[in-house]
Image (spheres, rainbow, N blue to C red):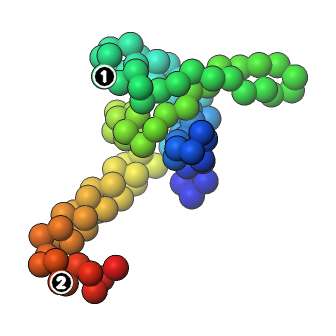
Amino acid sequence: MNNLVVLRDRQAVTDTLKVAESLDKKHKHVLETARNLAAENSATKKMFVESTYVNRGKEYPMIYMNRDGFTLLAMGFTGKKALDFKLKYIQAFNEMEKRIRQPKSERLEIM
C-alpha cells in the first residue's frame, strides 16, 4: 500500500486502479462501488472525481478519490488485504487519540 497515494492538483489522492491493486480487487468492482457511493449521497460527490487512463492506446474509466473517499470505499470491502487496511486504520486512530489525550507538554516531546 506504499504507492497508494499520489499528489494531484496539490491534493493527496488515490485512484480506483491503485485501490484495486492494493486491496486485491477487480478494478471494475472498485469502480462500480465508488460510483455507487458517489450516487447514494450528495455529500460524497466531492470525494470522487471521474477520470480516465490509457492502456494499449485505449481509454478506460477510473476515479480519483481523496482520503475520505478512499476510507469510505475501503471500509466496505472484505478480504485479507481489506482487513489489514482496516486494522492499520484503527491502530492509527487509536494512536492519534492517545496522543491527543496526553498533556500538551508531553505531546511536543513526541513530535
Q: Point out the image quarter for the N terminus.
A: bottom right
Mark 1, residues whose alpha carbon is within 10 Å: few (<14), some, or many (≥20)?
few
| Separation (CA) of disc 2 from disc 1 | 37 Å
Identify the residue under disc 2: 105
Q: Quadrant of residue 17?
A: top right
64 shown above or below 38:
below
Instruction: Mark 2 vs mark 1: give the one in front.
Output: 2
Identify the residue under disc 1: 43
The three-letter amino acid code for the residue at tag 1 is Ala
Mark sitting earlier along the chain (2/1): 1
Q: Point out the image quarter for the C terminus.
A: bottom left
In terms of depth relative to the viewer, which is nearer, 78 or 31? Answer: 31
| Residue drawn at x 55%, y 32% as measured from the top left | 64
| Residue drawn at x 35%, y 24% as measured from the top left | 44
In this image, 51 relative to 33: left or right?
Answer: right
Badge 1 element: helix
Determine whether label 2 and label 1 are within 8 Å by CB.
no
| Residue drawn at x 42%, y 30% as measured from the top left | 47
Can residue 1 be seen in the rendering of this structure? yes
In terms of depth relative to the viewer, which is nearer, 32 or 12? Answer: 12
Can residue 80 be seen in the rendering of this structure? no
The three-letter amino acid code for the residue at tag 2 is Ser
